[in-house]
Image (cartoon, helix red, strand yellow):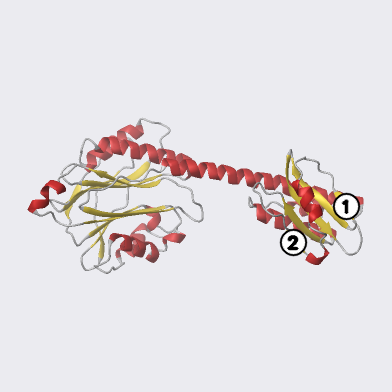
Amino acid sequence: MTLRSTVAGIGTTLDEETTCAELTRVAAEHGGCTAAVVRRHLEESDPSYEAVHGDRTLLPDLRWPAAMARRTDSRSGYERDGPALCVPLVSGDDRYGVLVCVRGTGPFTPPEADVLALLAERAASHIRHAREHDRMSRIVGDLQRALLAEPGRPHPNLDVAIRYLPVGQRALVGGDWCETVRLHFGRTLLVVGDVMGHGLEAAVDMTAYRSALRYIASADLPPHRVLRQLDDIASNESERRPATCLIARVDPVRGQITLASAGHLPPAVIDGRGDTSLLPVPVGPPLGTGLGGYEPATYRLDGAETLLLFTDGLVEHRGEDIDESLNRLARLRFDAAEGVETILDTVLANLDAGHAEDDVAVLASRLRHRPQPDEEGMAFAT
């Protein structure tokens, strides 16, 4: 194996633990020795041998490499203690710990020690990149969570539950969102949206859409006119990413919902028997295109029915026709006595949302009760 291919085996990921394991494996194979890492952590913690590759009993007393790992200087020269070699993990002005190598056949020659120092330098460079990546990920995550404001509270005549699941193992917020806005006369506006893309840029645009929605909703416009104004605002901002959006205005007093869609998937309704069906909604262009053309659709909604709004990550699978994806949702059955929280848990579990290929945002709502004459003052509160 050439030195070039040996070095290439270190730093194949942006994970620090993986880099340390690759370093000790390559060092042990190249030097015919036992190799381990003692890291210098930013937080106070007891040092230990990590990523040991080979016979652990050959490793020297931990106090020697631990003292070297704690040094704050950036010297890159190695030190010896009998047959053991201690090589700093140094990149630039930063020290991340030491590589410890030892073998029972005798000390390392200067050329062997130089190669091990080269491997340690390679690993230190990747550890620096991994820590910088983790630091930036935390900053981005903090910014995104700050951007993702909690949805408003619906009227007390409506039970609402919301879930947001980022795709895969990442905990970062993307462009999917849910919102609830109180309107006059006991009505509530329910909204789901999906900004194209992921990451911080999508989260920033998502926040801009939500802020504009809250402002426009204060005028108590019907859903299709809310979409029209959102589209006008977004299309005048060249950097704004397009987004799909579905708005449902729930009117418990009349027992009806009015829907409008900007390129979004239709909502589902779970009836009093636990059967699921999709509500047809005229689909207009995504927000930000400037094309307009949104139309409303109104349906009856009784107290036994649950309305389900969701983003495409809940149902879509790569290579599958969207109609089949939606049919999978429509085939779900529920216990009519289940509350909205339980319904969402059931939906997410049955559609395996934990392994979705895109972010998932889903909202379930149900009328709490029909107002009685002596409750009308409360039901019409704003």
Image quarter of residue 300: bottom left
Q: Residue 120: in sight, yes or no?
A: no
In this figure, which residue is indicated by the disc labeled 2?
Answer: 52
Image quarter of residue 108: bottom right
Residue drawn at the location 86% of the way across and 62% of the way down = 103
What residue type is disc 2 on?
A: Val
Residue 376 in the image, given as x and y percentages of width and height: 11, 49
Judged left or right of residue 41, residue 277 is left
Which numbered mark, 2 or 1, is in the foreground of this view? 1
Image quarter of residue 91: top right
Q: Nearer the viewer, residue 175 or 4?
A: 175
Q: Residue 188: in sight, yes or no?
A: yes
Residue 30 in the image, given as x and y percentages of width and height: 82, 58
In this figure, which residue is indicated by the disc labeled 1?
Answer: 80
Question: In the rendered image, which quarter contains the N terminus?
Answer: bottom right
Residue at mark 2 to residue at mark 1: CA–CA distance = 19 Å
